[in-house]
Image (cartoon, rainbow, N blue to C red):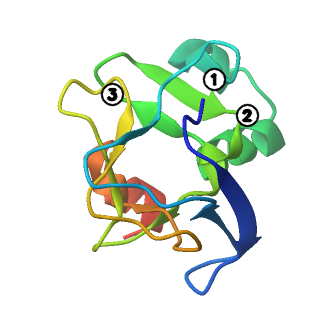
Amino acid sequence: MFLKKTYLEKSNIHGIGLFAGENIQKGEIIWIPSDLFTLHIPEDKFKGLDISDQDIIRHYGYFHKEMNVWHFASDNSRFINHSVNPTIVRTKTGDGVQALVDIVRGDELTQNYSDFEDLRDVLGG
């Protein structure tokens, strides 16, 4: 669940992106997990889903190898695009997302996907 204002807009990186709706200072927590917005799908249940449903979860979610579950968020965090120069990062404890740099209202929020999954799986490399 977002603790800061955000909005969706066309991204220069890919499709639709998530943008800061207010200025955010480096280190501020901007997102925390919430059972209201995130599904945790065990791998065995994921494999039992239709291929089209699996594709949606793969595109908008990610697989947490240590927990052996798929995370699928229904909030706008699913629109955070990948960047090797991200503006946000997972907290050291892994229980939230914080600003990696000062973010100005209107900046796209980006994350390095390798923080939480194997980029070969995500980017097809």
Specify few, some or many for label 2: CA neighbours under 10 Å numbering under 14, 14-19, or 20 or more: some
The numbered disc on residue 115 is: none
Q: Which amino acid does label 2 sit on?
A: Ser
Considering the numbered disc 3 on the image, is that residue within a helix, a strand or a loop?
loop
The residue to which callout 2 is attached is: 74
Q: Earlier in the sequence, mark 2 or mark 3?
A: 3
Q: Which amino acid does label 3 sit on?
A: Lys
The tally of labels here is: 3
Identify which residue is drawn at 77% across, 41% down: 51
The residue to which callout 1 is attached is: 38
Mark 2 and mark 3: Cα distance apart in space: 20 Å
* Coordinates of residue 43 in the picture (x, y in percent): 53, 19
The residue to which callout 3 is attached is: 65
Specify few, some or many for label 3: CA neighbours under 10 Å numbering under 14, 14-19, or 20 or more: few
Considering the numbered disc 2 on the image, is that residue within a helix, a strand or a loop?
loop
Considering the numbered disc 1 on the image, is that residue within a helix, a strand or a loop?
strand
Mark 1 and mark 3: Cα distance apart in space: 17 Å
* Coordinates of residue 41 in the picture (x, y in percent): 60, 17
Identify which residue is drawn at 29% across, 72% down: 84
Q: Quadrant of the image for the C terminus? A: bottom left
* Coordinates of residue 8 in the picture (x, y in percent): 74, 63
Q: In front: mark 1 or mark 3? A: 1
- On the rendered structure, is 29 left or right of 78? left
Q: Which amino acid does label 1 sit on?
A: Thr
